[in-house]
Amino acid sequence: MDVKGILILIGGNEDKGIDTNERDHLEFIEKSVLARLVKECGGTNAHIVIIPTASRIPIEVAENYITGFKTLGCENISVADIRNRDDAEKEENIALVKDADCVLFSGGSQSKITHKIGGSSIHKVLLRKYRTENFVIAGTSAGAMCMSTEMITGGGGKEFFNKGAVSMGEGLGFMPDLIIDSHFIRRGRFGRLAEATARFPKLIGIGLAEDTGLIIKNCNSFETIGSGMVVIFDASELTYNDQATTHIGDPMTIAHLKTHVLANGKHFDIEKRNIHVVPITEKI
């Protein structure tokens, strides 16, 4: 799919320059995931619209992001406070998204985003701008998970890999080739993403650690950013997958699940399913 826009998917708990006494914290946030987001959407003059729909405390969450972006020098920040489907049809919210250089979906519940925004006028504007303009759509935690077509909606324990433990739903469809999971390391979601990938082996499973993300351009490759790791599950070469024959609740088995672990600054080709590592001699 040929698109002009950029997706930025973040695993949650990214640094916002809040609640710290570290003397060097300003330098840290200036090298942070949010700082990279600001750069990708055109710099500190860009119009950034925060959409805290997923959160139970949308006002507080939006204020935290406003503080973080202002710490980075941004002033043109708005909030599209969408709490129901009617809000996703209001002219003032549609106008904000039309004028935005970047929208950022907060964390919380990804199902809230799809139920309240999926299929709405705002969703249609987002799809159009993403396909035709130099426009950034970013999301953290639940806001990242909803970007795919096949979306994890919940379930999965730290110690189990059982059929049916993971529930799936329809996401916003900006990135059809991926399944996204967030807080991947801290919350032990290996089994959850493995089951989702076994269920949809043609898709690539992406596990994002906290304060870690992807920058996806033209839907065919991404760059890793942030302080943690990105775990990739590629089920395209499985030699055994009993997902279709296993009963609900029973343990599953898959064989030859290809796994990659990427740190900051690495590139992955989604179409070719391989890592592009820049040699040291090519680095500046």
Image (tube, grey):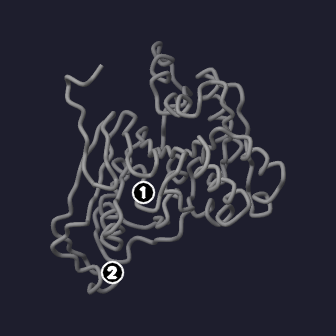
**Which of the two residues, 83 or 40, is positioned nearer the viewer here?**
40
Q: Quadrant of the C terminus?
A: top left
Tell me the amino acid under the disc marked 1: Ile
Secondary structure state at the residue bearing disc 1: strand
Q: Residue at x 64, y 28 (%)?
A: 67
Tag count in the figure? 2
* Residue 273 placement (x, y as % from top left): 27, 54
State yes or no: discs 1 and 2 in contact (Cβ < 8 Å).
no
Secondary structure state at the residue bearing disc 2: loop
Alpha carbons under labels 1 and 2: distance apart? 23 Å
Front tag of 1 and 2: 1
**Mark 2 sits on what residue?**
249
**Mark 1 sits on what residue?**
180
Q: As drawn, is 136 to the left or to the right of 100?
A: left
Q: Is residue 192 above or below residue 126?
A: below
**Which of the two residues, 234 or 284, is positioned nearer the viewer here?**
284
Q: Residues within 10 Å of mark 1 (few under 14, many from 20)?
A: many
Q: As drawn, is 75 to the left or to the right of 178?
A: right
Residue at far right of view: 91
Q: Quick one: label 1 or label 2, which is nearer the N terminus?
A: 1
Among the 4 quarters of the image, the one containing residue 62: top right
Q: As drawn, is 166 to the left or to the right of 171?
A: left
* Residue 181 placement (x, y as % from top left): 41, 56
* Residue 10 placement (x, y as % from top left): 47, 44
**Which of the two residues, 274 or 251, is positioned nearer the viewer here?**
274
Tell me the amino acid under the disc marked 2: Gly
**Which of the two residues, 275 or 194, is positioned nearer the viewer here?**
275
Q: Residue at x 59, y 47 (%)?
A: 106
Q: Residues within 10 Å of mark 2 (few under 14, many from 20)?
A: few
